[in-house]
Image: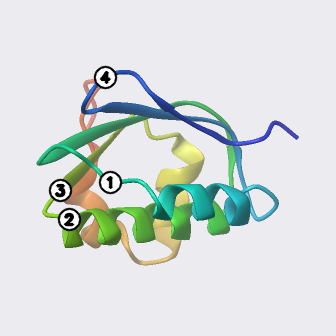
Amino acid sequence: MKVATWNQHGESQYSLTGDLSRDSVPKLWLSLQAISLPEQQVDISLQGLTRVDSAGMVMLIHLIENAKKQNCHIMLSFVPEQLRTLFQLSNVDDLIAGHLKNTTGVDCG
């Protein structure tokens, strides 16, 4: 298991890497709750994720909701197919569609 890490690459550029799973989410979520997002829009690349499960999906949804409270809009890029499937199976694909960035030339919604 690769521990999930949150990385900042600029004022509004972040990435998540590693395994975003029930084993890594609790510790990661504690650190993410304390961050203050400085911009009106933040881009988070998921390209470095090696694994994501339903706990990881829920954490991302909570991250989006917490950002909204800070008047910040989160855009997710390089969303793994596994996560897209979880969004669909959980019936939240409509809720999340406005937060998916089209970086591959295919429909992200």
Which residue is disc 1 drawn over?
36
Q: Choose the circle earlier in sequence order: 3 or 4.
A: 4
Instruction: Estimate the spatial distance between the alpha carbons at disc 1 and disc 3, rounded to whole Å.
Output: 10 Å
Q: Is residue 47 above or below residue 41?
A: above
Residue at the spot x=28%, y=62% of the render?
Answer: 67
Residue 59's x, y, as percent? 53, 65
Q: Choose the circle earlier in sequence order: 2 or 1.
A: 1
Secondary structure found at label 4:
loop
Instruction: Estimate the spatial distance between the alpha carbons at disc 1 and disc 4, rounded to whole Å.
Output: 14 Å
Say what amino acid the circle numbered 3 marks.
Cys
Q: Is residue 69 left or right of residue 84?
A: left
Say what amino acid the circle numbered 4 marks.
Gly
Instruction: Estimate the spatial distance between the alpha carbons at disc 2 and disc 3, rounded to whole Å.
Output: 5 Å
Quarter of the image for residue 23 reads: bottom right
Secondary structure found at label 3:
loop
Which residue is disc 4 drawn over?
10
